[in-house]
Image (cartoon, rainbow, N blue to C red):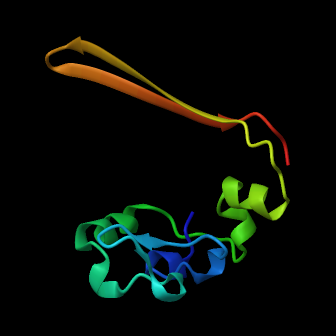
Amino acid sequence: MPSAAMRGGNFSQILPTVITDFTNNQPFAGNIIPASRLDAISQKLLEFYPASKSTGIRRWSPNYLALQNNVTNKNQFTTRLDFVESTKSSWFGRLAGMTNTF
């Protein structure tokens, strides 16, 4: 779960990862996305996700944990299955995981 700071666009705690502006391919200064650039709809959707109870970054992202622990073998996978039952009914499922342990 993203921290309260991340919900507001402040990603400074995840350095050395750089947050890049896709409109001009330049990094955001200090890894902080200005509030004016945050989508209003996405901000409202955050109300439906619980706030993070963790104060540390290590529980936020397995990929970041792998970087911190100098893990070079990051065997990850993501798969999606789509099933169209009829014109009025379709289903999908997604599975993601990692094969190495930390």
Residue 30, horizontal then vertical, whole percent: 54, 87
Residue 70, horizontal then vertical, whole percent: 84, 58
Q: How many marks?
A: 0
Image: 2 above or below 97: below
Q: 95 and 26: which one is in front?
A: 26
Q: Is residue 70 left or right of residue 79?
A: right
Q: Is residue 62 left or right of residue 84?
A: right
Residue 37, horizontal then vertical, whole percent: 29, 80
Q: 40 and 11: which one is in front?
A: 11
Q: 25 and 84: which one is in front?
A: 25
Task: Give the residue displayed 37% in from the left and 26% down from the top.
Answer: 92
Image: 82 above or below 78: above
Position of the N terminus by quadrant? bottom right
Q: Which picture quadrant has residue 99?
A: top right
Q: Hey, which residue is sitting farthest front in the picture?
A: 25
Task: Give the residue displayed 39% in from the left and 67% down from the top.
Answer: 46
Q: 43 and 34: which one is in front?
A: 34
Image: 13 above or below 73: below
Q: Hey, which residue is sitting farthest left in the picture?
A: 87
Residue 41, horizontal then vertical, whole percent: 24, 67
Q: Which picture quadrant has residue 12?
A: bottom right
Task: Give the residue displayed 50% in from the left and 72% down from the top.
Answer: 19
Task: Give the residue displayed 84% in from the left and 42% down from the top.
Answer: 101
Q: Is residue 18 left or right of residue 86?
A: right
